[in-house]
Amino acid sequence: MLNNTNFKPHIYEGFKNESAKPHFWMSSQKWINETNAIGIISKSGRYGGGTYAHSDIAFKFASWISAEFELYLIREFKRLKEEEQKQLGWTAKREFAKINLAIILIYSKVKLCG
């Protein structure tokens, strides 16, 4: 798969088909162990136990649970990209001006020497 060459897609397909049945039950540990999933850690125990996931997986899961959260993520992403573009815009204009000046100076020297 994308980042996990050891992932077992045939097991995933089996889970996907079984999930429509009313008796289907899945734990995070079963998912990890049977599909060779990476990016998810599941620990048993009263203290220190829990399920932890890579941020990409956690965001996808949270988006699936809550449409409101998904919209929040989209809006926040757009805001960050706009901020990035504002900063890059100034930097890019500055860099273009420097390059343009260098080209003019080189052209001037070639013209004077030639």
Image (cartoon, helix red, strand yellow):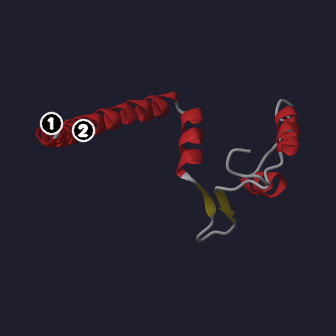
| Secondary structure of residue under mark 2 | helix
Disc 2 to disc 1, C-alpha distance: 28 Å
The residue to which callout 1 is attached is 111
Q: Position of residue 14 (x, y in %)?
A: 88, 39
Q: Nearer the viewer, mark 2 or mark 1?
A: 1
Which residue sits at x=53%, y=50%? 55
| Secondary structure of residue under mark 1 | helix
Q: Position of residue 73 (x, y in %)?
A: 43, 35
Please determine whether, in this image, residue 49 is positioned above or below residue 114. Answer: below
Q: Is residue 45 left or right of residue 8?
A: left
* Residue closer to the observer: 27 or 101: 101
Please determine whether, in this image, residue 65 is positioned above or below residue 31. Answer: above
Looking at the picture, which amino acid does disc 2 mark? Ala
Pointer 2 or 1: first along the chain: 2
Q: Position of residue 108 (x, y in %)?
A: 13, 38
The residue to which callout 2 is attached is 92
Please determine whether, in this image, residue 18 is positioned above or below residue 42. Answer: above
Count of numbered circles in the view: 2
Dot 2 crowding, Cα within 10 Å, few <14, some 14–19, many 20+: few
| Rendered-image quadrant of the C terminus | top left
* Residue closer to the observer: 7 or 20: 7
Which residue sits at x=85%, y=37%? 13
Which residue sits at x=84%, y=54%? 34
Dot 1 crowding, Cα within 10 Å, few <14, some 14–19, many 20+: few
Looking at the picture, which amino acid does disc 1 mark? Lys
